[in-house]
């Protein structure tokens, strides 16, 4: 960010007038509120109780007592937690230069070339890595029949040993 916004003018051109300015001695702080992010989570609970009483086919009861009675109770409850945070950018200036910056909720990062990166060395490394992976694969292919024989022999020994005692 310091490369993209080295001066007050570059910060002002990109972000405009700051939401808040603070000055302490020769250090100036510009705060830009970019927006708000709200996250919520809800938990719901629903319980019910139903009850049926009387027997409508009971011949020993009067017709009015044979009626079907249903009681139902239901309780619903929802609890929601919500929090809102500001997304912002802050810049600290000494004179006209940016000395420090801070962001929250936004990403102004970009790819920067590494001066220590050597492309030919990286290609050699990739070639060595591929050779090593191929050797590892070939080794596994050679060991596969041996592994199968060992597992098969163990299964036969198990069956002979425990099969005879059953």
Image: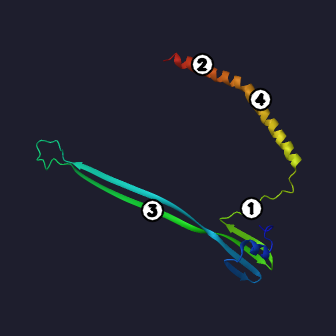
What separation in Å lies between label 1 and label 4 (alpha carbons)?
Answer: 43 Å
The residue to which callout 3 is attached is: 79
Q: With 55 as the anchor, is 117 left or right in this view?
A: right
Q: Vertically, is 26 above or below 41?
A: below
Q: Distance between the residues labelled 1 and 2?
A: 62 Å
Q: Is mark 4 on a helix, strand or loop?
A: helix
User: Which colour assignment does the render follow?
Assistant: rainbow
Q: Residue at x 56, y 17 (%)?
A: 160
The residue mark sitting in front, 4 or 2, is 4
Numbered label attached to residue 138: 4
How packed is label 3: few (under 14 Cα within 10 Å), some, or many (20 or more)? few
- Residue 156 badge: 2
Comparing labels 1 and 4, the label whose residue is closer to the camera? 1
Circle 3 SS class = strand
Residue located at (52% from left, 62% from top): 40
Q: Mark 1: few, some, or many residues within 10 Å (few <14, many ≥20)?
A: few
Q: Which mark's residue is nearer the viewer, 3 or 1?
A: 1
User: What is the quadrant of residue 23 in the picture?
Assistant: bottom right
Total numbered labels: 4
- Mark 4 touching mark 3, by CB under 8 A? no
Image location of residue 32, percent across then percent down: 68, 74
Side of 84 relative to 114 (left or right): left
**Residue 159, image quadrant:** top right
Which sits earlier in the primary sequence, circle 1 or circle 4? 1
The residue nearer to you, when weighing 155 against 95, is 95
Q: Earlier in the sequence, mark 4 or mark 3?
A: 3
> Which residue is painted at 72% across and 77% down in the image?
29
Residue at 53% from the left image edge and 20% from the top image edge = 162
Residues under labels 2 and 3: Cα distance?
61 Å
Q: Mark 1 points at which residue?
A: 109
């Amino acid at each position: 960010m310091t490369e993209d916004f080295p001066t007050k003018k570059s910060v002002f051109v990109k972000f405009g007038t700051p939401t808040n300015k603070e000055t302490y001695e020769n250090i100036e702080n510009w705060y830009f509120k970019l927006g708000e992010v709200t996250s919520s989570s809800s938990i719901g609970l629903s319980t019910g109780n139903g009850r049926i009483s009387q027997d409508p086919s009971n011949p020993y009861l009067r017709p009015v007592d044979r009626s079907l009675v249903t009681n139902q109770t239901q309780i619903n409850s929802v609890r929601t937690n919500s929090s809102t945070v500001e997304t912002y950018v802050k810049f600290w200036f000494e004179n006209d230069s940016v000395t420090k910056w801070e962001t929250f909720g936004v990403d102004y990062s970009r790819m920067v070339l590494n001066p220590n990166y050597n492309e030919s060395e990286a290609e050699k490394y990739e070639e060595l890595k591929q050779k090593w992976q191929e050797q590892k694969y070939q080794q596994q292919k050679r060991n596969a029949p041996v592994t199968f024989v060992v597992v098969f022999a163990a299964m036969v020994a198990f069956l002979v040993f425990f099969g005879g005692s059953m």
